Image (cartoon, grey):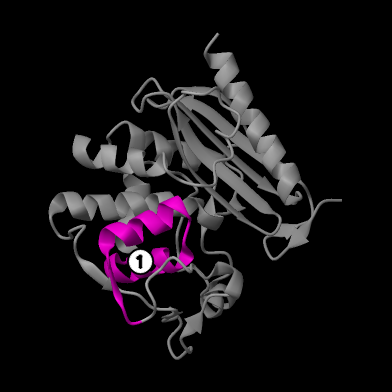
């Protein structure tokens, strides 16, 4: 029996997809199985923000007011705070401002839920949905902000992913199907700085990579690209449920190493 939580019935599950940046599938296992998204859905938020920046409807120098309380999607529900474990102490104190550039970096590099919520409040969930549609990210959805318990109780699991959908989303990012060259480079450089790599943890030194991981109790995922971003790079997405954190991490790391080894012989 595996690990149970709000997002796991205790049955260990693992799915993956290995593809090229152009979408050519090299290997997969249950790529359409649905999982709670955890922080991997922040990849779609990053792309949505990059599109606004490219369109000129936002600017990296724009300042957002930091806050530690957020409005629920449920009418009449009280504002909520994130749990202590989810608080990002690198954010500006509540009421003070910080540049949009820093908020995006906190969301990606340290996977800040506070930063993500600020960006969703600034831009809305609509642009995130448009990114997912344009990327053909089947089975990936962001339906609420992080920590909105009232919405979770009303709607159930609203943030979901599949390994196939995550791979499609990352492929769209690295091949420039979502943004032009400047903002595609902005996204890939940001993803290359994230501090919680899993798939890329055991790659040979010098291999370029970028990723967006995510985990909560009994859930651990990662989606990454290896090699120079573009149609020929390797894209790997792995989703796990019902496994101990370290156990899932070992499996994800091993799949990343194996995928790289088999495609570079």
125 or 106, nearer to the observer: 106
Quickly name the residue at label 1. 120
Is residue 28 among the parts visible in the rendering? no
Q: Judge by depth and name the residue closer to the eye, 25 or 204.
A: 204
- Whether residue 209 is situated above or below residue 38 in the rendered picture: above
Q: Nearer the viewer, residue 111 or 122?
A: 111
Looking at the image, which residue sits at the far left? 56
| Left-right relation of 25 to 65 | right
Residue 33 location, quadrant? top right
Q: Could you tell whether 30 is left or right of 145 in the image?
A: right
Residue 112 counted in the magenta span = yes
Residue 143 at x, y percent in the picture = 45, 64
Q: How many marks?
A: 1
Which residue is at a point 64% across and 38% down the rendered structure image? 15
Q: Residue at x 27, y 71 (%)?
A: 64
Q: Which residues are magenta?
A: 95-124
Secondary structure character of the magenta stretch overall: helix
Residue drawn at (41%, 49%) of the image: 43
Q: Quadrant of residue 190?
A: top left
Relative image position of residue 206 (x, y in whole percent): 46, 23
The x, y position of residue 171, in whole percent, is 39, 34
Is residue 119 covered in magenta?
yes
Location of the C terminus by quadrant is top right
């Amino acid at each position: 029996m595996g690990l149970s939580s709000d997002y796991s019935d205790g049955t260990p599950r693992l799915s993956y997809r290995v593809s090229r940046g152009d979408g050519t599938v090299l290997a997969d296992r249950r790529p359409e199985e649905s999982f709670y998204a955890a922080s991997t859905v922040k990849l779609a938020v990053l792309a949505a923000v990059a599109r606004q920046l490219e369109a000129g409807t936002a600017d990296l120098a724009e300042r957002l007011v930091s806050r530690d309380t957020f409005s629920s999607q449920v009418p009449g529900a009280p504002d909520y705070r994130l749990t202590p474990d989810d608080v990002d102490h690198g954010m500006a104190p509540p009421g003070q401002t910080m540049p949009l550039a820093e908020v995006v970096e906190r969301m990606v590099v340290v996977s800040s839920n506070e930063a993500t919520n600020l960006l969703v409040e600034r831009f809305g969930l609509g642009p995130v949905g448009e990114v997912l549609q344009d990327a053909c990210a089947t089975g990936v959805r962001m339906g609420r902000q992080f920590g909105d318990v009232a919405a979770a109780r009303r709607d159930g699991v609203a943030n979901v992913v599949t390994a196939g959908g995550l791979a499609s989303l990352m492929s769209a990012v690295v091949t420039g199907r979502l943004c032009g060259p400047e903002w595609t480079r902005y996204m890939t450089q940001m993803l290359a700085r994230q501090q919680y790599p899993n798939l890329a943890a055991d790659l040979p030194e010098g291999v370029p990579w970028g990723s967006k991981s995510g985990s909560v109790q009994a859930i651990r995922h990662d989606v990454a690209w290896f090699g120079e971003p573009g149609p020929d790079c390797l894209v790997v997405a792995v989703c796990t449920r019902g496994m101990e954190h370290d156990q899932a991490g070992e499996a994800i790391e091993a799949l990343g190493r194996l995928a790289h080894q088999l495609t570079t012989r």
